[in-house]
Image (cartoon, grey):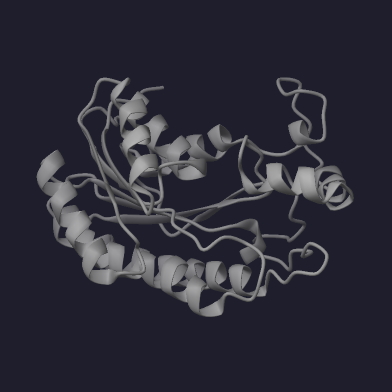
Amino acid sequence: MDLGLGGKKALVTAASQGIGNFIANTLAAEGADVAICARTPDRVAAAVEGLKAHGGNVSGAPCDVSDHAALKAWVEQSAADLGGIDIFVSNASAGGGGDKWDEHYAIDMMGTVRGVEAALPFLKESDAGAIVVISTSAAVEAFPPPPMTSAGAYGAMKAALLNYASFAAQQHGPAGIRVNVVSPGPTYFEGGPWHGIEQGMPPFFEMIANGIPLRSKAKPDTLAGQMGTGQEVANVAAFLASPASSHTTGVNVVVDGGFTRRVAF
């Protein structure tokens, strides 16, 4: 299926590694020109080199999304580098665990709000403007925190993003801009948070992995193989960002293998 991403201009925050990097590479592989940011210059430079292998126009710069002036400058410079913006993916997060309320508000919530505000003038000029916000399945139901930690701030701020995105979809729909959310469940990749939990808290890791009912014959028959992959999340994000999803807006797609048990009417 042709997603229609060839030649589209996409910005992805926090994309030097993890889910953001999977999304950036998936968009680039589909023919999009991609700009990324993250806080660590060396990681950004390495990620940019990897993205160039897809053959498109690529740019990247270090940026802390909680610095609103720096975020706006990165968005504007990226638009200049790529020749516009068709897609804005807000992926940056302070990460799960701990009561980092101020940090989650500054990065997850306001990093998204200010990033969208900076990208809007360019998205309005696009014939296929799309915003994709990365949330979490912990936003839609109470997630069991690891022992001795609290996931409250993470889930609460990610839940706030769902409301924000729903409102933004209504607000910016008349300008032809779609706004959707992808909420990953437990997602395993080398060097990622669940890889660390597997090493440091095996019983908790086993409990969560066994709570995912979907089993894929294409994956290893291991506990880690029961979790989602970064690529599976990226595939959904790329679809929602693409013209192939042109009449979809205001939705939250949970990618979790059935881990959450809510009934979503």
* Residue drawn at the location 49% of the way across and 60% of the way down: 93
Asked if residue 166 can be seen in this view, the reply is: no
Q: In which quarter of the image is residue 172?
A: bottom left
Residue 4 position, x and y percent, is 29, 30
- Which image quadrant is residue 31 in? top left
Q: How many marks?
A: 0
Residue 221 position in % (x across, y down)? 82, 24
Q: Which of 223 and 130 lies nearest the eye of the viewer?
A: 223
227 or 7, which lies in front? Answer: 227
Which residue is at a point 77% across and 43% down the rendered structure image? 199
Find residue 69 and report its horizontal and vertical position in percent. 22, 69
Q: Nearer the viewer, residue 42 or 220?
A: 42
Q: Residue at x 23, y 55 (%)?
A: 176
Q: Which residue lies furthest to the front in this view?
A: 42
Quadrant location, the N terminus: top left
Farthest bottom residue in view: 102
- Pinpoint residue 51: horizontal percent, then vertical percent: 33, 28
In the picture provided, is 55 more to the left or to the right than 144? Answer: left
- Residue displayed at 25% across by 20% down: 55
Horizontal side, residue 197 vs residue 44: left or right: right
Is 115 situated above or below 88? below
- Quadrant of the drawing holding the C terminus: bottom right
Examine the rendered structure and indicate whether residue 203 appears above or below residue 160. Answer: above
Q: Can residue 158 be seen in this view?
A: yes
Q: Is residue 230 left or right of residue 90?
A: right
